[in-house]
Image (spheres, helix red, strand yellow):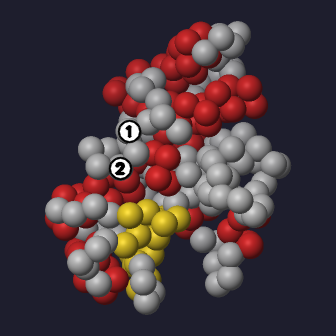
Amino acid sequence: MIDLYSDISIQQALHWLGYNKNYNVYGIDGVLGDKGGASLSREDIKDLQQDNGLDPDGVWGFDTQHVAQDLLWTVQATEHFHMSEFACETNVEGTIHDEGCNGWPEIMNITFLGLLEELRKKVDQVIVVTSGVRCQTFNDSLSGSAVDSYHRLGRAADIYCSGWSPTGIARLAESLGLKTIVYETFTHVQYNGEGY
């Protein structure tokens, strides 16, 4: 069963969905404020709830998280990447997932996707995402996946770009501050930094 998101992940979800009162003032600070309080993050949660037919109580519960997960499928994350490209592969027949995964066991890291967009602009070609965020069960079902994979944190993706070798993509990604692992047909890129 997928747990409720951390406060930092909730703020990132709100940002991706366009509920940005807190983000525009404080950024991602991991402080939602007291339940029932009047913080900017709680106001963002209430706005999300109100806009989607939920009781606008400002409390992030499973109903609110499920609505957010459904909405994330529709988000244009950056100029060249749609959020759905990074979803846990719940739509692939035969894959197994944590209960409640719904494609979003964790939120994609804002800084990571910003760096991936920079990489896309540098190669000036389509970058195909073959794997983004993963729930624990799906990650564990993949041969060779690390137990503590950055995919589980929304901070990694496996990518390839036609006309670029995996090594060439890795070198360019590393010049932007991303960590990489080169495979025969794709490059694993991840963000180990502290930013959200």
Horizontal relation, residue 55 to residue 73: left or right: right
Where does the image place residue 61, in percent across and percent down from the top left?
Answer: 74, 28
Q: How many marks?
A: 2
Instruction: Estimate how packed mark 2 is, as few (under 14), some (14 to 19) or many (20 or more) residues with alpha carbons within 10 Å.
Output: many
Confirm or deny contact between disc 2 and disc 1 (CB under 8 A).
Answer: yes
- Tell me which residue sits at (38%, 39%) in the image: 76
| 22 with respect to 138 (left or right) | left
The mark that comes first in sequence, 2 or 1, is 1
Residue shown at the point (39%, 57%) measured from the top left: 112
Residue 14, position in %: x, y?
50, 30
93 and 42: which is toward the camera: 93
Does any portion of residue 87 appear in the rendered image?
A: yes
Name the spot of residue 131 as percent of width and height, x first.
Answer: 52, 65
Q: Which residue is mark 1?
A: 76
**SS under mark 2:** loop
Q: In the rendered image, is residue 111 in sight?
A: no
User: Which SS class for mark 1?
Assistant: loop
Q: Is residue 193 above or below residue 64?
A: below
Extreme-front residue of the structure: 93
Q: In the image, what residue occupies the spot 68% across and 13% down?
A: 54
Q: Classify residue 152 as left or right of residue 17.
A: right
Marks 2 and 1, how far apart at CA: 6 Å
- The residue tagged 2 is 81
